[in-house]
Amino acid sequence: MVEFAVNALTRQTLAGLRMILVMTVLVGIAYPLAVWAVAHLPGLSAHAEGSVITAPDGTATGSSLIGVDPVAKDPAADPYFHTRPSATAKDILGPGDPSTSAASNQAGDSEKLLKAVNDRRAAIAAREGVNPAAVPPDAVTASASSVDPHISAAYAELQAARVARVTGVPAADVARLVAEHTDGRALGVLGAPGVNVTELNLAIARAAHGR
């Protein structure tokens, strides 16, 4: 009886060890390698590596998936397109921390949120020299991630005149670059077209320096 129990336990132990070995090979080695191989097929490899944006000299300058709101050395001569505000920012317009993704989690009837929206609208209107009513909604509300690289075409258009004036890039060229860096609707029908600010600012900088 004891010998039978020992044999049964041995068989079960060996079966368990074989299962561990098989699943380790399948799930721990074969599956990750298959996913890695598919991700690095032509046309997909850039996305698999973080959608890194590189400068003409090959230097990594950011990711097309992460919005980074640059800070102008002289606010009176701001040459940048700006992203949506970030919930991680310490002041009304930012910049936020691109290494942290967080939402404000404030309800639509929050007095704190309403004040932030109104303060942002006033600050952006002053920066762009327009009436506060001309400031689009996405310019004053943070995205769920707070690192969304896209803004609406309306917000890009609002900033285009300032960027052209400060950088010296002709307004027509700025408009062309905005159009070139506008992504269409997801699947052709979902959401609205969005302008990738991270990519656009790099393109503007190249145009301003004749590159």
Image (cartoon, grey):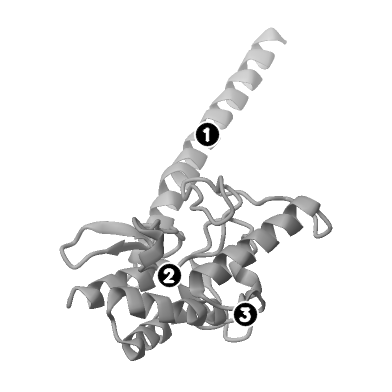
Instruction: Name the kind of residue labelled 2 in the image.
Output: Phe
Q: Residue at label 3?
A: 134
Q: Position of residue 58 (x, y in %)?
A: 18, 61
Say if residue 95 shows up in the picture: yes
Q: Residue at x 63, y 85 (%)?
A: 189
**Which image quadrant is residue 116 in?**
bottom right
Q: CA distance from mark 1 to mark 3?
A: 63 Å
Label 3 crowd bin: few (<14), some (14–19), many (20+), radius 10 Å: some
Residue at x 64% of width, y 58% of height? 144
Which amino acid, by three-letter code, is at mark 3?
Ala
Mark 2 or 3, closer to the camera: 3
Query: Can the viewer see residue 78 in this picture?
Result: no
Of the pair 98 and 33, the residue shown nearer to us = 98
Q: Is residue 126 above or below residue 34?
A: below
Where residue 77 appears, as percent x and y from the top left, is 36, 66
The residue labelled by disc 1 is 20
Q: Amino acid at mark 1?
A: Ile
Q: Is residue 51 above or below residue 192?
A: above
Q: Quadrant of residue 139?
A: bottom right
C-alpha separation, residue under disc 1 versus residue under disc 2: 54 Å
Q: Which residue is mark 2?
A: 81
Residue at disc 2, secondary structure = loop
User: Which label's residue is closer to the chain start, 1 or 2?
Assistant: 1
Residue at the image point whose x is 62% and y is 60% from the top: 142
In this view, the residue farthest toward the bottom is: 172
Residue lying farthest top?
Answer: 2
Q: Nearer the viewer, mark 1 or mark 3?
A: 3
Q: Position of residue 61 (x, y in %)?
A: 29, 58
Tag 3's secondary structure? helix
Left or right side of 119 for 207: left
